[in-house]
Amino acid sequence: MLTFPNAKINLGLNITEKRPDGYHNLETIFYPVLIEDALEINILNEGNGKFRLHQAGLEIEGEAESNLVVKAYKLLDDRFNLPPVEIHLFKHIPSGAGLGGGSADAAFMLKLLNNKFELGLPDDTLEEYAAKLGADCAFFIRNRPTYAEGIGNIFSPLPLSLKGYQIWLVKPDIFVSTRDAFAKIKPHHPEMSLKEIARLPVEEWNGRMVNDFEESVFPQFPAIGEIKKEMYRQGAVYASMSGSGSSVYGLFKEDAVLPEVDFGEKVFVYKSQFTDI
Ligand SMILES: C[C@](O)(CO)[C@H](O)COP(=O)(O)OP(=O)(O)OC[C@H]1O[C@@H](n2ccc(N)nc2=O)[C@H](O)[C@@H]1O
Ligand SMILES: Nc1ncnc2c1ncn2[C@@H]1O[C@H](COP(=O)(O)OP(=O)(O)OP(=O)(O)O)[C@@H](O)[C@H]1O
């Protein structure tokens, strides 16, 4: 059985409070983007292990045991004693990008196991399992435009569509640690709620919809801020860093012609029209 975990971007990200447990309360909008990994599971017949992970595409740091697809398998295996599985993961979504690639893989693994082994878990339950695996993992269960608050885990669906716009997303060869990015932030409440801003036309987002991480990440990595400036020079209606970086996206009118721009070596670039979700 095969599935295609997709990325997300953050439309706005306000970090409002530091909590006693060290995590931060925030508000953001998650929006699905069709940059995709491929994830397949089959029943594993040989050997006596419970799983075997084969990886291709972009490299992921760390041991197989720490891969989020394996953590997702173990989580459900502990509860349902699943058959052994052979896992194939083709990585296309860059890591350390603010695109939630690892979280997407984990959530799609839960959905895949639920279907393959007919566990009959409803979305609410899958979201509870997903939340144990990462802050924004649960978003990928329903995978639709979502307003998130709390630590990024309390969701409400949002009637928002970017159909009629193009996205141009650039991820430079810079790895931003989410933990470090949070540590440099001074939390504060925004003047205007993100939910209200999202009701305005995209043309009115610039100057209102803010990603708080830009303030701490751009001074440390000016090259990321330069990409955002370039997006606006090229006519973006709205541009922002996604999550804690390092990817930056621009939203452009449907008929805008996006040129080839040299953003440096080992840069990941994605251009696409938004379609209906
Ligand atoms: C910033 C976002 O990218 C927004 O989409 C996500 O909330 C981050 O999600 P993520 O990369 O899956 O983050 P996790 O792996 O869960 O957390 C990484 C680290 O970020 C910090 N962290 C994360 C989420 C949160 N609400 N407050 C935090 O302070 C914690 O130090 C945590 O150890
Ligand atoms: N299946 C996986 N794909 C990518 N990274 C994984 C995976 N499993 C574990 N990881 C670990 O998670 C880290 C973060 O990866 P991820 O792709 O979620 O990037 P991110 O850009 O930090 O996402 P976010 O938007 O959540 O901040 C990686 O450095 C890697 O060590």
Image (spheres, rainbow, N blue to C red):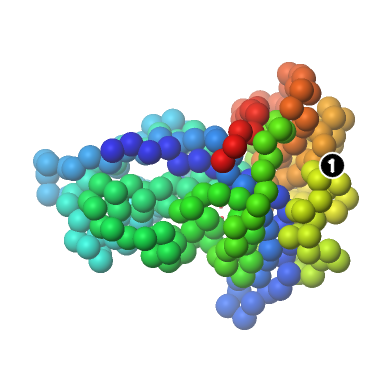
Structural crowding at the residue carrying mark 1, measured as other residues with C-alpha within 10 Å and reported as few (<14), some (14–19) or many (≥20): few
Q: Which of the 4 image quarters holds residue 236?
A: top right
Q: Which of the 4 image quarters holds residue 175?
A: top right
Q: Which residue in the protein does label 1 denote?
A: 203
Which quadrant of the figure contains the N terminus?
Answer: top left
The residue drawn where x is 71% and y is 32% is 164
Residue nearest the observer in this picture, 157 or 236: 157
Q: Is residue 227 above or below residue 19?
A: above
Residue at the limit of the structure toward the bottom, as seen here: 20
Q: Is residue 190 above or below residue 241?
A: below
Where is residue 83 drawn, in percent x and y?
17, 52
Element class at badge 1: helix
Mark 1 belongs to which amino acid? Answer: Glu
Q: Is residue 101 above or below residue 91?
A: below
Q: Is residue 164 above or below residue 77?
A: above
Drawn side of residue 244 relative to residue 55, left or right:
right
Where is residue 266 drawn, in percent x and y?
62, 28
Where is residue 153 drawn, in percent x and y?
55, 65
Determine if residue 12 is in view. Answer: yes
The residue drawn where x is 75% and y is 53% is 198
Drawn side of residue 53 relative to residue 12, left or right:
left
Determine if residue 175 is in view. Answer: no
